[in-house]
Image (cartoon, grey):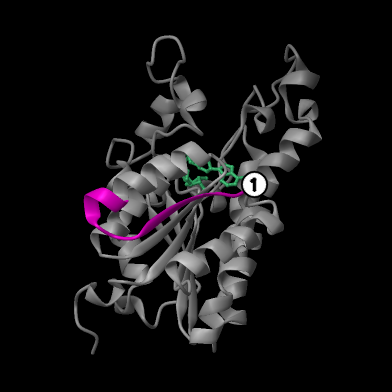
Amino acid sequence: MNELNFNHLKGKTCVITGGGGVLGASMAEALAQAGMQLAIVDINQDAATSLANRIASEYNVKTLGISANVLDKKSLEEARNQISQELGPIDFLINGAGGNSPKATTKAEEILPDMDGLWENSFYGLEMEGFRQVFDLNFIGTLLPTMVFTRDMIDAGKGGVINISSMNAFKPLTKIPAYSAAKSAINNFTQWLAVHLGKTGIRVNAIAPGFFLTNQNRFLLTDESTGELTPRGHKIIASTPMGKFGDSGDINGTLLFLLSDLSEFITGVVVPVDGGYSAYGGV
Ligand code: NAD
């Protein structure tokens, strides 16, 4: 039986895409506490660098902040070269870059009879550019980093990938069809890749967070001018049996478990961390 601790993660190297964001930063901090070396990869260079500097000095672990775009394979390969040179082979990957955008969000939840602004406020008014941007960021932005950052794991015969899914992968949320479709595709891909890599020693799992108030959903859940919850924000709290948004640290126990040998025989699963949201039928 494995030892019941995370000591074996110490000194391992993990890449976190979207590592400069709210959940990414929290995951990075948890992994640093476990003694892991980190490459924080984010399109926002300042966010990646300042977090890497803080973590390196606070936890005394080697940490790189690297600017790369998860939709650009060449920039990911450049990041990989830098990581190889400065940290050595990559042991783990967390695909955290993602999010929604107002450009892929309908104004209306559903079409009602005689609705004002039928064409512009509903599904029919969605611009393909915004739809594609959100779908690609979440899905292709998981696929490409996985191609680039798991090569060392194949050589080592061991490794782990954690994809970040969402509640909307199980049941689509109103207004956000591109984001929902992309996260659903991530669940499917998690299972597909777990099978494809089943005999390589690389495990592929996903975490589906419930609702955490962060930059990518603030515009939907809170009123910009007052900071109060929007009707949608209230609905979410009412649909979450634990009655609150998640705290950014709430996914870290599940993350460490899924990366570690404690979950050695687990691959191809999507674990909800959602305060009970996915269990609640609404009545
Ligand atoms: P966030 O906006 O704080 O972080 C997202 C990070 O991704 C940002 O630092 C951003 O710069 C980076 N990023 C965006 N585009 C990129 C690109 N092309 N290349 C590289 N980096 C890029 O959001 P968050 O809430 O911390 O989200 C992290 C992950 O969790 C996302 O995949 C999101 O979909 C998922 N998620 C969040 C929630 C929630 O309630 N906040 C719920 C479910 C899933």
Locate residue 152, reporting x and y percent: 54, 78
Residue, x 39% and y 10% (percent of image)? 226
Q: Is residue 29 visible?
A: yes
Between 258 and 272, the one lying in front of the other is 258
Q: Secondary structure at mark 1?
A: helix
Please tell me whether residue 153 is drawn above or below residue 275 in the rendered image. Answer: below
Whether residue 250 is visible:
no
Mark 1 highlights which residue? 137
What range of the chain is rendered magenta?
56-68
Tell me: 91 left or right of 69. left
Quadrant into which the N terminus falls: bottom left
**Membership of 45 in magenta stretch:** no
Distance from mark 1 CB to nearest ligand 1 atom below 8 Å: yes
Please state the horizontal and vertical placement of residue 266, each as a whole percent of the image. Answer: 41, 77
Q: Quadrant of the C terminus?
A: top left
Q: Nearer the viewer, residue 251 or 232?
A: 251
Q: Residue at x 32, y 79 (%)?
A: 261
- Is 29 situated above or below 232? below
Q: Quadrant of residue 33?
A: bottom left
- Coordinates of residue 135 in the picture (x, y in percent): 68, 46
Task: Identify which residue is drawn at 80% across, 28% down.
Answer: 124
- Name the residue: 68% across, 33% down: 104
From what the image shows, is residue 239 above or below residue 257? above
Single out the residue that lies furthest toward the left: 4
